[in-house]
Image (cartoon, rainbow, N blue to C red):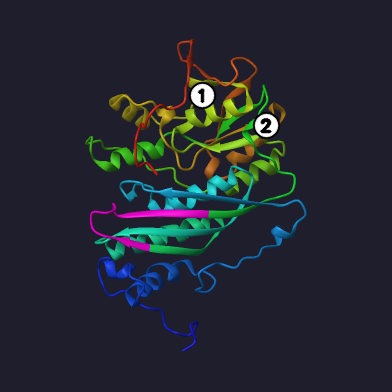
Amino acid sequence: MNERLRPPRRVVADRVTLAHGGGGKAMRDLIEDVFTSVFAPPGMEDQARLMHPSLLEPGAQLAFTTDSFVVSPMEFPGGDIGTIAVCGTVNDLAVGGARPLWLSAAFIIEEGVEIATLRRIARSMQTAAEAAGVRIVTGDTKVVGRGSGDGVFVTTAGVGVIPPGRDLMAGNVRPGDVAIVNGVLGDHGAAILAARGDMALTTDVISDCRPLNLLMEAVLAAAPDLRCARDATRGGLASALNEIADAAGVGVVIAETDLPLRAEVKGVCEILGLDPLYLANEGTLVLFVPPEQAEAALAAMQGTAAGVGACIIGQATAAHPGTVVMKTVFGGGRIVDMLVGEQLPRIC
């Protein structure tokens, strides 16, 4: 029977077994029923064959990134490992000025994981991909024995195109440039911490996991001289700002009173002795623009769903190059260094 006309295979088991990674009928059933029926990649070959008009534009550059996701728990308020896998890869492309187009997805699945869990993860990935306007076009599955993994790990790779003339790099930041974030800080880290249940914390905070490529396109249209952007994932805002300051050889000054933080996130941090500046985010970025384009960039961000809470938090300075300083509510200054160690493992 023609492959395209054959009815899709169905998984009959309730949980993943080693046979689902053995290369035979059980594996084919799992792939077709749980994954390709949702992602609808072009064909069933071992590679995706891709073409897009933007690749033919003179001066266009191909952008490529990859990332692995091991978040615990796999499902949490505001998303799951599938949502993070798509959004994290899309955002890595977007903050570099690329327009994300295609993703791959590889799964390492522990024996015993419920098939229903895999279905939810796959649906979450497809929902996030549709929101970002990208396609999941190829992938892989592997099954490891019980106790050899921890549920599901996902590795994604992303391909996009950087249009001619775009050059977003941290080294482009100059003294006087304005720092803007698109929303509240620390929601993802706080949501994961509460979902683990280790500290008996209860909070209504949900992860900020979301794609940021549409926001980036809006900002670039309004502020074409955008210097650079960073998504504030592991290490939080503090690490992102330090990376930029170090690469550009500038100092960065931020104001504590301007940082957008929920009272619930502040409360969680106070109880556990954490610093919200280092909490991970999965849908929050910081960018730098020339001062004359700051208001246009801010308005463009606030006009998108992912940037409603955008605000200016500080600026680059020629003073103390390579160092980030926060003006505290008491009028003093505090050095905000890179994160040392791991504040919260298995966050993404």
For the residues marked 2 and 1, what is the alpha-carbon distance in whole angstroms? 24 Å
Q: Which residue is mark 1?
A: 258
Q: Classify 271 as above or below 224.
A: above
Circles 2 and 1 in contact, beta carbons < 8 Å: no
122 lies above or below 75: below
Residue drawn at 60 percent across, 40 percent down: 301
Identity of the residue drawn at 40% across and 26% down: 340
Q: Quadrant of the C terminus?
A: top left
Mark 1, other Cα within 10 Å: few <14 / some 14–19 / many ≥20: few
Q: Quadrant of residue 118?
A: bottom left
Relative depth, front residue between 20 and 15: 20
Q: Which residue is under mark 2? A: 172
Q: Amino acid at mark 2?
A: Asn
On screen, 332 above or below 225?
above
Tell how many labels: 2
Please identify, in this view, whether the residue under mark 2 or under mark 1 is nearer the observer: 2
- What secondary structure is marked by label 1? helix
- Residues packed near mark 2 inside 10 Å, few (<14), some (14 to 19) or many (20 plus): some
Q: Which residues are magenta?
A: 142-157
In x, y percent, where is residue 112? 24, 61
Residue at 38% from the left image edge and 37% from the top image edge? 189
> Residue 53 is drawn in which quadrant?
bottom right
Residue 104 within the segment the image draws in magenta: no
Q: Earlier in the sequence, mark 2 or mark 1?
A: 2
Q: Residue at x 38, y 25 (%)?
A: 275
